[in-house]
Amino acid sequence: MEKDELKILAQNLANPQGEKGIEIGEMMNATNISMTLESIKTLLIEDDEDILEIGHGNAGHVKNILNRAKNLKYTGVDISETMHNEAKKLNKDFENQAKFVLYEGKKLPFDDKTFDKILSVNTVYFWEEPVEFLNEIYRVLKKDGTFVLTFGQRKFMETLPFTEYDFTLYSNREMEQLVSQSHFKRMKISEKEEDIPSKSGNETIHRIYTVLTIKK
């Protein structure tokens, strides 16, 4: 891909817009689904819980969350109006259990201690003030709640040509240091590996990613 194409791809991975954004959203859902399902499993969702997802994309996976237990409520937040609208359209069958909120990416528009479980997959690269945002997540998480943060490790992400455009990358150690600067203090790291199609679709790449379980 040419430099300009890589920049456009990077911009749409951060904040999908318009027809191209819908296409990117579908691609992200396909390439990230195993990371998302691993994150959902790690949350250990139980009956009657309130779940928040930060950066839901097109949210084609919401049914996988709602099927984990009984009487769940799901809330998704995203900065992309395109993804917000796509998520509502794709999940209209679940409108009694799932709602989607458009936000500006810094302040979570919820009261303190609202959610039992929170997850975010492949969004941390775009957080402008990561420690402050972690503290926002801490604020809206209930006592003894769980936050699962899943991300591609720096060493792997640096092999992808589009990540040089406005991505902030983290190793496990760097992420641990970041979390330790926030109100969160307890965390457990799990490393995963998988083979996935590349964003161009022309090859398979070996992805190494981290599922970080963070407790309040």
Image: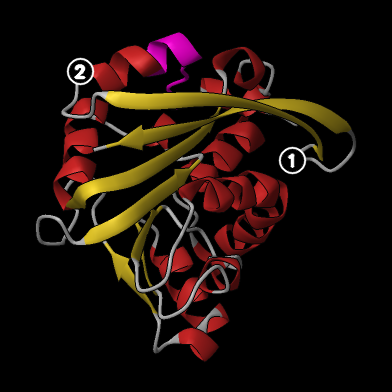
Residue 106 on image: x %, y %: 20, 44
Query: Foreground mark, 1 or 2?
Result: 2
Residue, x 47% and y 65% (percent of image)? 83
Q: Nearer the viewer, residue 77 or 84?
A: 77
Q: Give the dominant element type of the magenta stretch: helix, strand or loop.
A: loop
Residue, x 41% and y 80% (percent of image)? 71
Residue 80 on image: x %, y %: 40, 59
11 w.r.t. 90: above or below: above
Where residue 25 sits, quadrant-wise, is bottom right
142 w.r.t. 9: above or below: below
Cβ atoms under marks 1 and 2 closer than 8 Å:
no
Q: Is residue 11 left or right of residue 35?
A: left
Q: Is residue 19 magenta?
A: no
Residue 153 on image: x %, y %: 57, 20
Residue, x 23% and y 44% (percent of image)? 137
State the extent of the magenta-drawn residues as a range: 166-175
Quadrant containing the C terminus is: top left
Dot 2 surroundings within 10 Å: few (below 14), some, or many (20 or more)?
A: some
Rendered image: mark on residue 181: 2
Residue placed under numbered mark 1 in the picture: 199
